[in-house]
């Protein structure tokens, strides 16, 4: 399937798709990941992964752009979501250089940024090692994606 959206549905009780992310989930609050729920995983799903990416961040690096705020993978196929402040599965390295969630923190005065919370359904339990960057992770999983979708929240600092 590669990178095509599917019927998978992604939601959070913290905000509606397209709305502002509450400060609790940002650098100006508790900086904890929001709870996420998903449904509609393909029957053949063997593993699930989640990442949060800000395409509006003024960061360009070889082969990539924007800022990765969170990457978590090796989640079981039977899962239907993550609790707030989740640390299940294996954690990748975000663009702040650490593992775990780093919430929205756009440069002050940089305007509104969009944060996409992606959920990927994979056809294998890949048991990937912790500490992968988003680019490394996507290179390994792209041939195994059965379905994917996302929801978006926004945030800005004055």
Image (tube, grey):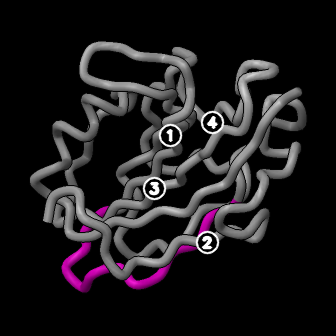
Could you tell me how far apart the alpha carbons at marks 4 and 2 are, in whole angstroms? 17 Å
Residue at (46, 25) in percent of width and height: 93
Could you tell me how far apart the alpha carbons at marks 4 and 1 are, in whole angstroms? 11 Å
Does the magenta run of residues contain 46? yes
**Which quarter of the figure has residue 113?**
top right
**Residue 17 vertical position relative to residue 3 in the rendered view, above or below:** below
Could you tell me how far apart the alpha carbons at marks 3 and 2 are, in whole angstroms? 10 Å
Q: Give the quarter of the figure containing the C terminus.
A: top right
Residue at (41, 58) in percent of width and height: 75
Query: Which one is earlier in the sequence, the residue at label 1 or at label 3?
Result: 1
Q: Identify the disc placed on residue 53.
A: 1
Residue at (30, 63) in percent of width and height: 47
Q: Camera-side residue: 23 or 47?
A: 23
**Which quarter of the figure has residue 100?**
top right
Q: Identify the disc placed on residue 4.
A: none
Is disc 2 surrounded by few (<14), some (14 to 19) or many (20+) residues within 10 Å? some
Q: Are marks 1 and 3 in contact (CB under 8 Å)?
A: yes
Residue 26, position in %: x, y? 79, 37
Q: Name the residue that disc number 2 marks.
A: 11
- Magenta part of the protein: which range? 35-47
Secondary structure beneath dot 4 equals loop
Query: Which one is earlier in the sequence, the residue at label 3 or at label 2?
Result: 2
Q: Name the residue that disc number 3 marks.
A: 118
Does the magenta run of residues contain 15? no
Q: Are marks 2 and 1 in contact (CB under 8 Å)?
A: no
Query: Which one is earlier in the sequence, the residue at label 2 or at label 1?
Result: 2
Q: Give the quarter of the figure containing the N terminus.
A: bottom left
Could you tell me how far apart the alpha carbons at marks 4 and 3 are, in whole angstroms? 14 Å
């Amino acid at each position: 399937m590669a990178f095509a959206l599917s019927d998978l549905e992604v939601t959070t009780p913290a905000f509606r798709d397209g709305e502002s992310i509450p400060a609790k989930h940002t650098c100006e609050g508790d900086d904890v990941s929001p709870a996420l729920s998903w449904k509609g995983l393909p029957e053949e799903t063997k593993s699930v992964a989640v990442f949060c990416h800000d395409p509006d961040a003024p960061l360009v690096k070889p082969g990539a752009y924007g800022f990765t705020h969170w990457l978590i993978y090796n989640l079981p196929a039977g899962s239907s979501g993550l609790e707030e402040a989740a640390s299940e599965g294996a954690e990748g390295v975000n663009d702040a250089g650490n593992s775990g969630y780093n919430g929205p923190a756009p440069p002050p005065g940089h305007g509104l940024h969009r944060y996409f919370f992606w959920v990927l359904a994979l056809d294998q339990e890949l048991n990937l090692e912790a500490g992968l960057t988003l680019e490394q992770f996507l290179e390994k999983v792209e041939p195994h994606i059965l379905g994917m979708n996302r929801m978006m929240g926004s945030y800005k600092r004055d």
